[in-house]
Image: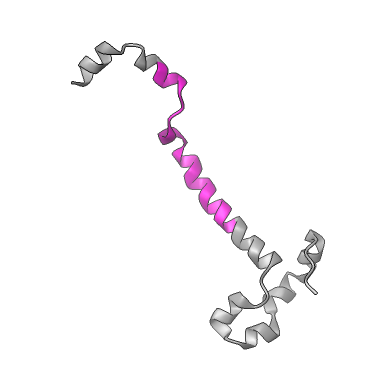
Amino acid sequence: MLESWRLKYPFRKEMDSMVSSPVRELPQVRILTPVAALGMALFYVVALDQGLLLSLVQGSPAFDMNLIHELVHDARHAAGFPCH
């Protein structure tokens, strides 16, 4: 059946080499997706976190101690994020 299809459309083989296939681009997506997710997570930690991440482990004292905020405090100001 496949051979009869190829005989009916002989130009298809030539077109396959000209058109990029999503299957060929899949390894790029597999690499870029985790990199983008990690970048967004780091952006959240540097720019927005005010104790929420550590509160999952420490509980309510994490909001008062604000350890992640203090750790990345200078990086926030260098990146232009106001934090107080």
In the rendered image, residue 9, in percent from the top left (x then y), is placed at 30, 13
Q: Would residue 67 appear left or right of 31 to someone viewing this image? A: right
Magenta residues, dominant SS class:
helix
Residue 41 on the magenta segment: no
Q: In the image, 41: left or right of 84? A: left
Give the residues in magenta.
Answer: 15-38
**With respect to residue 82, does 79 lie above or below?**
above
Q: Residue 6's spot in the image, x, y percent?
A: 27, 15
Seen in the picture, residue 40 relative to 3 is either above or below; the reply is: below
Q: What is the basis of the colouring in this image?
A: one colour
Residue 71 sits in which quadrant?
A: bottom right
- Label count reads 0
**Residue lying furthest bottom:** 61
On screen, residue 73 above or below 58: above
Say whether residue 80 is left or right of residue 64: right
Q: Residue at x 26, y 12 (%)?
A: 8
The residue that appears at 25% across and 11% down in the rendered structure is: 7
Please identify the residue farthest to the front as the structure is shown: 8
Q: Position of residue 15 (x, y in %)?
A: 41, 17
Image quarter in which the C terminus is found: bottom right
Q: Which quadrant of the view contains residue 64?
A: bottom right
Kindly indicate the quadrant of the structure image that contains residue 39.
bottom right
